Image (cartoon, rainbow, N blue to C red):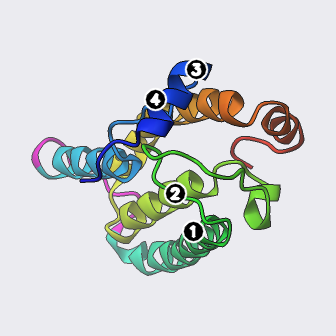
Amino acid sequence: RRAPDPDRTRRQEMTDQPATPGVRIPPPLIYLAGLAAGFALDRWWFPMPIVAQSRETWIHLHAFAVGLVAVWLLASALRSFRRSRNDPRPWREDTALVEDSLYRHTRNPMYLGMALAYATVALMFNALWPLLLLVPVLVVIRWYVIAREEKYLALRFGQPYLDYCSRVRRWF
């Protein structure tokens, strides 16, 4: 673990600006918890397939397509963060405002990609419960993670971030 930077602590005290968005639970764990709860309901309470077993081939083809989009979104978003030398982990300090590539069209391509990856897994296993639980997972992501990030970025980057928010939608 790195030692605290006294200069950053002083800067934070002088500006009353938080050093990080304050997200404590990694967003991928929130998505995984939703998936685990959905599969637990499917296994131990009441199994609900999305389609009949005879039509599973079609749902697997759809899952493959959704999975490709998810991988593309996640890879493109991570590449944009690396290009700007920014850390994508929401519990770390941001060094730059990322506005290129996919970020010109959505402010949250990583969370969108994770949601599509989640949906891909649910489709691959033909399980409706995980798909239904994606809604509360997205509510948690929106209000616990994204709301904190947006507040932090507005304080950190000011008017340029607010202008970006007025140009680009949160999801798509």
Residue 143 in sight here: no
Name the N-terminal-most of marks 2 and 1. 1
**Which residue is labeled 3 in the image?**
14
Q: Sequence order check: which comes first, mark 3 or mark 1?
A: 3
Q: Is residue 48 one of those drawn in magenta?
A: yes
Callout 4 secondary element: helix
Of residues 111 and 117, the one nearer the viewer is: 111
Report, in whole angstroms, how far the alpha carbon at label 3 lies from the one at label 2.
26 Å
Q: Is residue 24 left or right of residue 88?
A: left
Q: Is residue 83 left or right of residue 86?
A: right
- The picture places residue 129, in percent across and down from the top left corner, at 32, 46
Label 4 – label 3 distance at C-alpha: 27 Å
Residue mark closest to the camera, 4 vs 2: 2
The answer to whether residue 41 is left or right of residue 72 is: left
- Badge 1 marks a residue whose secondary structure is helix
The label shown at residue 136 is none
Q: Is residue 119 above or below residue 107?
A: below
> Disc 3 residue type?
Met
The part of the chain drawn in magenta is: 44-52
Q: Position of residue 98 (x, y in %)?
A: 72, 56
Specify the amino acid type for callout 1: Leu
Q: Position of residue 170 (x, y in %)?
A: 71, 41
Which amino acid type corresponds to the residue marked 4 in the rendered image?
Tyr
Compare residues 48 and 54 and report the one nearer the observer: 48
Q: Earlier along the polypeptide chain: callout 3 or callout 2?
A: 3
